Image (tube, rainbow, N blue to C red):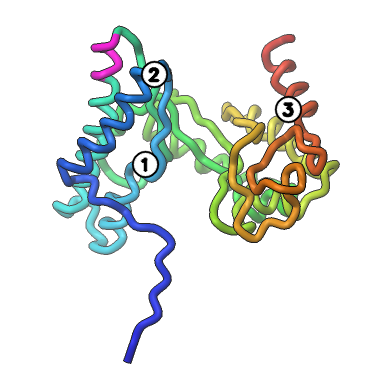
Amino acid sequence: MGWDYKTEARYPDITNPEFQELLLSWAKKQIDLGIDAIWIDLLFKQAVFFYRITGDPHHQAVKESYEAACKIVDEIHRYGQLRGRYIYVGSWATPILLPYDAPDLDFVTYVPTSEEVFNRRFDEDGWDEAVEEIRRGFGDVLILAFLDSGPTVRSPLGVFSQNLTSTEQREFLRLADEFLQERGVVFAYPVHGMWMGDEATILSYRKSRMYDSLAPEFETYETIRELAQRKGGG
């Protein structure tokens, strides 16, 4: 009897020295080229996976995975200092799920759900609880929110681009900006570059599945600029 496995992603072992070296080499190259900030996707995911498998946050596999992820953050900071610059390092807020000292992240990310985007209504209690928990774990860290993307149109950005009209998209941007700002969260606007989903049919310039706020199919750039200027006092 055969098994039909569908694998959407594979995760290298964060505790593997060779993978650590590879990941750091990518970061160092970007620093050499002049970047000032790095966001690392799923950096603490392995620790969380092992926690869910074992049910024990102090299990050796959890602890080693967590420490390995923290090491990546520290090494990037250290390399930046060697190059005479401070490099801001961020990832998801997932470390708050584990009972360890918070990693030395400069910013963390948290995202609206697809349902919140579709309904254009935020779960106030859920967000208040999440922000409070992040503050408890990280202190006064910068929290960034954005419309996450993925391989399908069911992602928040997929729903935003494929299910909302241009007018509704502009309304959501204003709503999200105000809602998040009230909670001390910075909204990173969807200007350009995020994947709308493999099945996306409303395409930027009728040909690209990368969201572009300037594209005639969406036309959200002016709203984004207005919101950004308002924050900057311009």
Distance Cα–Cα, label 1 vs label 2:
32 Å
Q: Is residue 19 above or below residue 26?
A: below
Q: Is residue 41 above or below residue 226?
A: below
Label 3, residues with CA under 10 Å away: few <14, some 14-19, many ≥20: many
Look at mark 3 in the image and give the residue it sits on. 224
Kindly report which numbered mark, 1 or 2, lies closer to the viewer in this rendering: 2
Q: Identify the residue at the far front of this view.
A: 207
Residue 53: percent from left, percent from top: 27, 63
Q: Helix, strand or loop at disc 2?
A: loop
Residue 96: percent from left, percent from top: 37, 41
Residue 196: percent from left, percent from top: 63, 50
Q: Nearer the viewer, residue 90 or 85?
A: 85
Q: Helix, strand or loop at disc 3?
A: helix
Q: Helix, strand or loop at disc 1?
A: helix
Where residue 33 is drawn, which disc sits there?
2
The amino acid at mark 1 is Ile
Q: Is residue 17 above or below residue 35?
A: below
Magenta span contains residue 138: no
Disc 3 and disc 1 in contact, CB within 8 angstroms: no
Residue located at (40% from left, 80% from top): 4
The amino acid at mark 3 is Ile
- Of labels 2 and 3, earlier in sequence is 2
Look at mark 1 in the image and give the residue it sits on. 96
Label 1, residues with CA under 10 Å away: few <14, some 14-19, many ≥20: some
